[in-house]
Image (tube, rainbow, N blue to C red):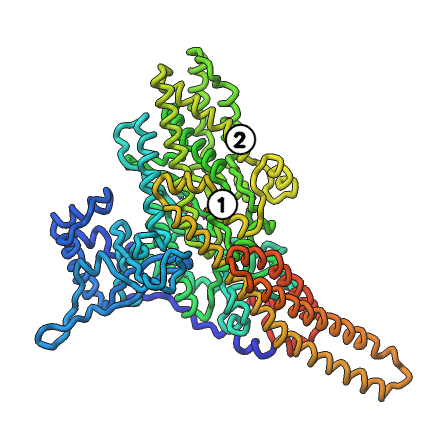
């Protein structure tokens, strides 16, 4: 460790973002770098602004003339801010964000230069798509992809560049990003939810899905990070004995934020607020050096963009504080991993949160429809929800006794759980008597008693109702929220559509509206009972129970991904125009390919480190012991026993070295055999079965050596340094 001691903690002095000698208020800087509605109004003619607003809210097409006007306005605003370049900013399927900058420069007829940015370049660009994951959609001879402006998410300035959020599709029109299908899923749920609301309130003409993500992350000192090739190349540690003290005392959670971290957070929030990301909450998480931040929730499309922007901003700001930010789902073995809870709800244009119990029986009937339809959706499409959140990183987080298991279930809390059971008992298929109806309505009307603050908090559930929203907790820290949001919104939309269809059919048969609705609610409750689970999701018994209920308990990523190829996936996505069959297949292939590549990289990195860091260090130390034993024996020939401890250590080290060597060579052979398989999906399966197990086996011996070998020569910073330097 010696050499790291001097490298670490070269923290910059507390930096505070200061403007004009004082820390700026968030109200002064919020959205400063965003081409917001307010700025659009300022830079556009009233008529152009109105047309753009309609395009943003109602999806009305934007013609070339309007695009030219908007582009001119954006350019004027950007130039005033010293911006020199523009880019289309999109979310390719590798999970990060992509940008290709172009300068505003163009040549004027007189040979000089001028700044140009018109409607044509605002609306569409043609980046070379050849190096983005495409899952077989793009032939190399058709490498072109298109990016097209998404006017629903405002342009912003980042790093001196005007960024225009866009979708990204192949030359053939097939989606190569998260945003394209997300916008379709959001349109679907808007329509489906609005139709239901029409039963209760004719003023509801639009329903937006809302998302508030909670981003967990680790910070690590940059010097220590640089001395860990596994962190640099894989985003997580592949070895490292647990620290004698880590999170046992639970003294980090919600504790006082360390000064250097706090100055990082302040600057991060400052940057975020300027970008219009409404970050509100920050706190220490459970593991040492683990933290969380969360914004005020927003419309899903914007919230997803903002989370992507947050992740890149975090990385940038962390470096200014000599930190690196780790978004991997499980950077350290033995302490908590990082997730990204997706808080989700539905909001009407009249300002009603559809997942918030109201104070009248009528509004609660509406609430119940949305509640049971969501439960029904998780029941029906649980496998797809799971497929949307599994990844190579999340594989080691989920089910780890700190994060929800990889079994999809819904937690409602005691009270609501009881309300649903009671509804099944009280409502029958037969005609209800007026008394029964009154009693039912009274009961339903009492629901608001479960106020936000006293909903139970079952932290072990992957999908929990938390008083006025659902919280999808299985999402991984590094994920693009778009993935799970596509599935969730489409799935709930479909259940709402079916609800409406079947309720209307009952009404057509002469059943009164209220009664028809109650009957349908009851039907959904009965059908989806098996997905509801109020108990401890971490317990072994739940797994057994889940098997009995016929829920999928598959834990490995590649098997879970197969849900994308199921008939159910086709019914959900293809029949509703969210993905074509080819696009769906491509999603599956891309996720599979990313999984495979990450596992392959980890296996290689571990092999390299074992052979050229660990074994040589172990041998060096063993040599020290050997000469020590030799010297002891020459000085104290009669006292053999004096060297007993050293001799036993020499033996143990030899055993570990031999084991590591054998395991690494077996792992390399397993990799070779798997690499020879032509079919990539099969290759990923074989990697999972035959390569992955070596990671833990090899690590076991390395971690044992770490305990034995002289700390002075151990080549890697240890967990106690990584987790406690701040
Ligand atoms: P907790 O850790 O207690 O779950 P946080 O305050 O960390 O709570 O995060 C809660 C998140 O849920 C915030 O981003 C918040 O804006 C969001 N949220 C609250 N209400 C809604 C809603 N109706 N729709 C979507 N997200 C919501
Ligand atoms: Mg939460």
Name the residue beneath numbered marker 1: 563
Q: Is residue 266 visible?
A: no
Name the residue beneath numbered marker 2: 529
Image location (x, y in percent) of residue 173: 30, 52
- Check disc 2: other Cα within 10 Å, few if <14, some if 14-19, many if 20+: some
2 or 1: mark nearer the eye: 1
Q: Report the side of 540 relative to 212 (left or right).
A: right
Q: Report the side of 42 relative to 415 (left or right).
A: left
Residue drawn at x 65%, y 65% is 699
How many numbered marks, from 0 up? 2
In the current view of this chain or complex, which residue is farthest to the right?
Answer: 638
Q: Quadrant of residue 707?
A: bottom right
Q: Is residue 179 visible?
A: yes
Q: Is residue 256 above or below residue 450?
A: below
Image location (x, y in percent) of residue 500: 36, 28
Which of the two discs, 2 and 1, labels the residue nearer the N terminus?
2
The residue closer to the viewer here, 195 or 725, is: 195
Contact between labelled residues 1 and 2, with CB atoms less than 8 Å apart: no
């Amino acid at each position: 460790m010696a050499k790291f001691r001097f490298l670490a903690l070269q923290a910059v002095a507390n930096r505070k973002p200061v403007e004009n000698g004082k820390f700026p208020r968030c109200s002064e800087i919020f959205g400063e770098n965003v081409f917001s509605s307010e700025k659009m109004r300022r830079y556009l003619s009233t008529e152009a602004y109105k047309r753009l607003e309609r395009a943003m809210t109602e999806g009305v097409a934007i013609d070339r003339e309007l695009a030219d006007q908007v582009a001119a306005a954006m350019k004027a605003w950007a130039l005033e801010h010293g911006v020199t370049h523009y880019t289309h900013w999109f979310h390719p399927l590798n999970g990060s964000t992509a940008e290709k900058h172009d300068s505003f420069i163009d040549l004027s007829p007189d040979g000089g230069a001028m700044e140009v940015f018109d409607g044509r370049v605002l609306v569409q660009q043609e980046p070379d798509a050849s190096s983005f994951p495409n899952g077989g959609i793009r032939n190399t001879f058709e490498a072109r992809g298109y990016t097209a402006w998404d006017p629903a998410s405002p342009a912003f300035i980042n790093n001196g560049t005007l960024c225009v959020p866009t979708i990204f599709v192949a030359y053939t029109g097939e989606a190569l990003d998260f945003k394209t299908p997300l916008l379709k899923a959001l349109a679907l749920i808007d329509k489906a939810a609005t139709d239901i609301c029409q039963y209760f309130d004719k003023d509801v003409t639009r329903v937006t899905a809302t998302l508030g993500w909670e981003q967990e992350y680790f910070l690590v000192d940059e010097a220590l990070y640089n001395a860990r090739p596994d962190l640099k190349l894989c985003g997580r540690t592949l070895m490292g004995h647990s620290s004698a003290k880590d999170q046992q005392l639970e003294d980090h959670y919600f504790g006082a934020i360390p000064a250097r971290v706090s100055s990082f957070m302040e600057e991060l929030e400052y940057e975020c607020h300027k970008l219009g990301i409404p970050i509100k909450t920050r706190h220490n998480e459970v593991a040492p050096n683990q933290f969380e931040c969360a914004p005020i929730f927003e419309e899903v499309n914007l919230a997803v963009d903002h989370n992507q922007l947050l992740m890149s901003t975090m990385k940038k700001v962390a470096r200014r504080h000599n930190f690196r930010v780790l978004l991997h789902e499980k950077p350290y073995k033995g302490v908590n991993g990082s997730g990204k809870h997706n808080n989700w709800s539905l909001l009407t244009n009249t300002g009603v949160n559809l997942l918030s119990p109201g104070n009248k029986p009528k509004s609660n009937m509406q609430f119940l429809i949305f509640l049971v339809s969501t439960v029904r959706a998780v029941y029906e499409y649980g496998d797809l929800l799971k497929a949307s959140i599994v990844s190579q990183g999340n594989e080691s987080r989920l089910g780890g006794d700190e994060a929800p298991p990889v079994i999809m279930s819904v937690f409602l809390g005691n009270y609501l759980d009881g309300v649903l059971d009671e509804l099944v008992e009280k409502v029958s298929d037969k005609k209800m008597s007026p008394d029964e109806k009154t009693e039912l309505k009274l009961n339903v009307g009492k629901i608001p008693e479960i106020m936000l603050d006293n909903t139970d908090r079952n932290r072990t559930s992957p999908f929990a109702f938390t008083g006025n929203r659902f919280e999808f907790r299985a999402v991984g820290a590094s994920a693009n929220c778009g993935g799970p949001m596509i599935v969730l919104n489409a799935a709930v939309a479909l259940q709402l559509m079916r609800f409406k269809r079947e309720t209307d059919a009952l009404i057509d048969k002469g059943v009164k509206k209220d009664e028809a609705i109650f009957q349908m609610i009851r039907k959904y409750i009965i059908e989806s009972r098996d997905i509801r689970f109020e108990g401890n999701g971490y317990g072994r018994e739940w797994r057994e129970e889940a098997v009995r209920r016929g829920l999928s308990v598959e834990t490995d990523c590649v098997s879970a991904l197969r849900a994308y190829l199921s008939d159910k996936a086709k019914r959900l996505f293809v029949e509703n125009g969210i993905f074509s069959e080819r696009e769906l297949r491509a999603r599956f292939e891309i996720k599979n390919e990313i999984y495979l590549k990450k596992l392959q990289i980890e296996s290689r990195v571990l092999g390299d480190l074992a052979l050229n860091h660990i074994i040589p260090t172990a041998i060096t130390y063993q040599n020290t012991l050997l000469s020590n034993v030799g010297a002891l024996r020459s000085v104290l020939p009669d006292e053999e026993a004096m060297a007993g401890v050293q001799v036993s250590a020499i033996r143990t080290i030899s055993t570990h070295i031999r084991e590591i060597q054998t395991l690494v060579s077996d792992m390399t052979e397993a990799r070779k055999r798997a690499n020879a398989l032509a079919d990539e999906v099969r290759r990923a399966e074989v990697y999972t079965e035959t390569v992955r197990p070596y990671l833990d086996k090899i690590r076991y011996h390395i971690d044992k050596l770490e305990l034995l070998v002289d700390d002075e020569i151990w080549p890697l910073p240890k967990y106690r340094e990584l987790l406690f330097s701040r």
